Amino acid sequence: MNVRSGQRVRPVPASDLTARARIRDAAIERFARDGFGAGVRTVAADAGVSAALVLHHFGSKDRLREHCDEHVLGEIRSAKAESIAKAESGSFLERFATAEQYATILGYVLRSLLDGGPLAQAFVRHMVDDANEYVAAAVASGIAVPSRDERARARYLTLSALGAMMLSITLDPPEDLSDLSSFMRGFFDEFTLPTLELYTEGFLTTRRMLDDYLLYVGDPPGERTAPMN
C-alpha cells in the first residue's frame, strides 16, 4: 500500500497537546503511510521532537506501536458509539471506511491487517461482533434467513468483506492517504451490486452441494465449537 500524506484524524484538543500526544499522532500517520518499518527517528522528526524524547515517553518502538494500537481502537469504538447514537443505518465498516476524518485511522488499520498482531485481531473481532448484531437483527425482522451457525456466518461475511477490501487496495493502492476515503467509496460502489445479487438471488440453482456437505460433516454445525473471534 503506497500512501504518502494525510491529515490528522481529528483536531487535537488543547488538553492533549503534549509531546506524548504529538508523538503518538505522528507515529500513527507515519505508520499508516509507510508501514511499521518506519523508524523512531522518522517519527520523531514528524513530531518535531528528538528520538531520545520518543524513547523517554514510550521506552521502545514496540511500546509506541502498542500505544498507537490502543488509541486507534479507542477511535474505532468512539466512531461506533457515535454511529449507534445517531441511529445510522447500513454497515459500520462502510461508513467508517468512507469518512474523510478517519482516513489516517483506516490507513493504520489496513497496515495492521497486513501486518497481523493484536490490533488486527481486535479489529476483526470488533467487526465480527458488529456483523453478528446486524445479522441477528435482520433475521429477527424477517429480512434474512437464519443460519445453522450464526457466528460462523457473521465471521465469514466479515472476513470476505475485509479480504476483498485488502486485496483491492493492495493491487490498486491510492497515491495519497487523503485519497483513501474516495478510494473506499469506489470500492463499495464496485462491489455493492454483485454482493447484493449473491445475498438476494443466490448463486447455485440447487442445494446439492449443501446437502452433500451436511452429510459429510455429520453433526450439525451449530453443535460444534465455533472458532474464537
Image (cartoon, rainbow, N blue to C red):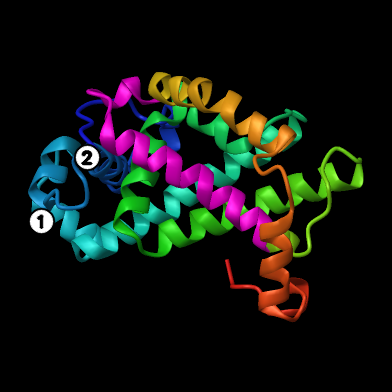
The spot of residue 16 in percent (x, y) is 41, 40
Q: Residue at x 44, y 20 (%)?
A: 186
The spot of residue 116 in percent (x, y) is 34, 60
Q: Quadrant of residue 203?
A: top right
C-beta proximity under 8 Å, tags 2 and 1 = no
Instruction: Give the main secondary structure, helix, strand or loop, of the magenta stretch.
Output: helix
Magenta stretch in the rendered image: 152-180
Q: Amino acid at mark 2?
A: Arg
Query: Mark 2 or 1, which is nearer the eye?
Result: 2
Q: Amino acid at mark 1?
A: Ala
For disc 1, the marked residue is 52
Marks 2 and 1, how far apart at CA: 18 Å
Q: Is residue 68 magenta?
A: no
For disc 2, the marked residue is 30
Q: Earlier in the sequence, mark 2 or mark 1?
A: 2
Q: Quadrant of residue 49?
A: top left
